[in-house]
Amino acid sequence: MGEDADSIGQTIRQVAQQMTLVQAQHDEHLRATKGRFNLFTVLLNEGDETRLHSRYLAYLLDPSGKHDCGSLFLTLFLEVLRKCGVQTHEDAAREKLECLKGEVCFASEKASVQPEVVVPEGRLDILIECPTWGAIAIENKIWAGEGNEQLLRYSTYLKRQYAHRAHVLLYLTLDGKTSTSAHGEKYYRISYKDHILPWLEECLRATYQHVNINQALQQYKNVVCKLVGHPTLETEYMEKMKDVVRANSDIVANWSTLSEAVGQLREEYRNKLLGELKEQLAAQGIKLCDRENSWLPLTKESSMKFPFGNITVEVCIDSFFKDGSPLINGAWTRDKDNSGLEFDAFMKAVMKSSTPEYDYNEDVAGWGGFYYQLAESKWLSVEQLAQHLKHPEDYKKIISGWVSHISKFIETVVKVCNESPGSTLK
């Protein structure tokens, strides 16, 4: 067993050296060709489902959009849905979504597209309306979880609003996972992997003569590829990597063991970050409580819950136990009459008082929230783990930055709630 381990270790070192060389050559090529530039990730985080993905997808799908391609992208999108098929909640097999080709066809050129449409039941990420047909609503999820009865509420809205017309609810995720909030209501699953990427390929082929839009589509496609784990690297580069693996078959034979070892190292790293986070927060007088699902509630003195009129704000860290980005999250129950007025007042006060740019969600009847993303979406990726293994003490600096943001976040909440009418905070 010891000799086998030594042999595998030697093979891994050889492969690592060869891959490092190939990677260095590829990086030099990217620098020379400026291939790493991507305007989307310069301006926004690659996993920003609202400001990046929902808005850009709606922009492309809109026949009246300033891309000046008319209904081309929407038509291609509908064709991909028919060609690739969609899945219901229960079925593994895909349907061809024949309802789009019924007696009254969906006329793309007459359609209107809007992002972030506020309705009594919440906020629809994308709403596509066709006056002669009906509507298609898209709920878009990258890393965020679903709200309470979210798809059930959206389905209720569509059935009421388009009672005598066709309507379809699409649930868009990275991999086509099932919804946890539909509760028996019909919806169709689509994914960035199996629908958005093929659609973008069709869009690229259709616009090859138009440089501006084609380059923007290619850059967005690269973002999606990264999110779903598709390689965006050149064929020549991948062939070189395959040659390295091919010449070292022990790597393939022991791949499952290596993968398990990497998984355990990731978990050790996560626990190390969690321990350091608790320690540094404690030094600031903030306690990080035990895990509640994916949430880590925070407390300071007696509570980390603050009143703002009928809203109660609770500060916590979310997604620490997921592969999505960890967030410092301020969540609250909506005002009692559910009108959203206090929600709007709170958000305006937060945005006015805060230095960092917070994002927010308000798509759940009964609660809302705002948050600050502590780390990039490639949270606990193998790349990040590799950097930690090379520089094992750097994690303390990472956590120090997190704690600074958390402290500012809490200060913002306290300040806004303290300045609210009728506040009891001192």
Image (cartoon, rainbow, N blue to C red):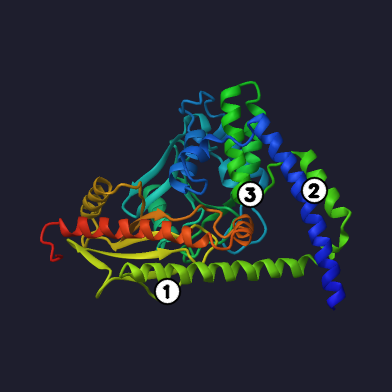
Rendered-image quadrant of the C terminus: bottom left
Residue at 13% x, 62% y: name it. 423
Can residue 59 be seen here?
yes
Quadrant of the rendering where the N terminus is positioned: bottom right
Amino acid type indicated by mark 2: Met
Q: Position of residue 179 (x, y in %)?
A: 51, 62
Mark 3 falls on what kind of element?
helix
Q: Separation of disc 3 and disc 1 at Cα?
A: 31 Å
Q: Reading the chain from its start, which is encountered first: label 3 or label 1?
A: 3
In the picture of the structure, the residue carrying the numbered disc 2 is: 241
Residue at point 51%, 52% (across, down):
376
Q: Identity of the amino acid at label 3?
A: Lys
Q: Judge left or right: residue 51 versus residue 13.
A: left
Q: Residues within 10 Å of mark 2 (few under 14, many from 20)?
A: some
Near mark 3 (Cα within 10 A), the count class, few <14, some 14-19 or many ≥20, is some
> Which numbered circle lies on residue 193?
3
- Residue 292: image tag: 1
Q: Is residue 50 above or below residue 107?
A: below
Q: Nearer the viewer, mark 3 or mark 1?
A: 1
Apparent side of residue 286 relative to residue 191 in the rendered image (left or right): left
